[in-house]
Image (spheres, grey):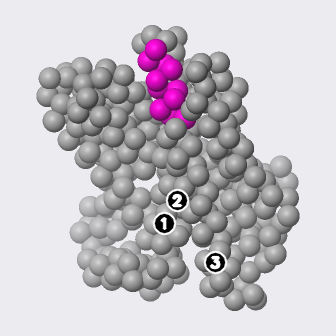
Amino acid sequence: MPFFSTLWQFDMQADELFILPALLGAGVFFLLAFLCGGLTALNAESAYLRQRKAFYDKYAQQFSGTVLFAWCAALVVFLPTAARFLPLPSVLPTLRELVDPRHAAYTVPALLALITPLLWLAYIRSWSALHRHRAAHLLIGLSALLSGLFLFCLLTLLLFFIQHPYISLLLDENPGAALPAALGEFTGNTSLWPPVAYFFLNGPAAAAALTRARLILRRNKDDFGRDYYVFAAHSAARSALFFTVAATAAAALLFLSLSASTAPEFRQMPETGILLAASGLPIVCALLHLVCAFDANPLRRKAGAFGACFLQLTAFCLQLTLLINTYPAA
């Protein structure tokens, strides 16, 4: 497999050969849940403002807690991985580079990576203080969401144009001219839309699956009553089901578009086992979410909640591995 056959250059031990792809996949999984998963929390609080039902308010609070948890989990995964496999002193910009206006390409993502979790923390901590000023509270949450989505856009552009001359302009010469040009090429190139849809939809799907498991873990500490947890379990399962199906459809569209646009000499035959697992596990996850969404007593589906969360993470890692190995030149 092309990706695995190049890992020797990182001076890896044999037992790390499969750990690295799993860690990278898990890190991206949690990062997407943090950057894109807040949509559901804000939608729940908006529903509370419209209908004044307390369950929506509690659900928004717990879901936003999952978003912040995903950020912490991404750090736990990414930092040791980066320390092990990246030459950090040569990769990280110096403080002088960060404050230099010519290096805005470093400064803006760094600031967003710092500001976004702080905004989510302020959003969660101000729940009681701004209970009578919901417009201000919702504005804080919207700022956190938009900050995360902007960071998602910047990371996506970096991923797509990593080998493009725009990156040298963006990082070294003229970020102000490179960013609009990259955005213009992206919007005009429809072949880039399927991967954006795939990564974006996996964010809310991951956040909803994590929320299902977190509701069970937090029930004894945040005991809001059985009726609330039935409502929250149903809501999280429905959200996870919808976004899992949508992300799976986006994954199929992504692979079909790559198959149609990539020359045969630049792609590899997919590994049968990984292909079957990457295709089948999302279906299993969707079924587990579906059972919980229509169960009269979803609280008893503890194994299904943790199983769906784990399988969703595994499916995402396998899909990334399949993508990298099948289309190494894409």
| Nearer-the-camera pick, 318 or 155 | 318
Query: Is 118 on the left or on the right of 205, as rendered?
Result: left
- Image coordinates of residue 224 in percent, x first then y, are 42, 13
Crowding around mark 1 (Cα neighbors within 10 Å: few <14, some 14 to 19, many 20+) is: some
Give the labeled residue for mark 2.
Answer: 199
Residue 205 position in % (x across, y down): 53, 46
Q: Earlier in the sequence, mark 1 or mark 3?
A: 1
- In the picture, which quadrant includes the N terminus? bottom right
- The residue type indicated by label 3 comes to Leu
Which residues make up the magenta segment?
A: 227-237
Circle 2 SS class? helix
Q: Secondary structure at mark 1?
A: helix
Q: Residue at x 14, y 28 (%)?
A: 133
Picture residue at 27% right of the left edge, 37% below the top: 46
The CA span between labels 3 and 2 is 15 Å
Q: What is the count of numbered marks?
A: 3
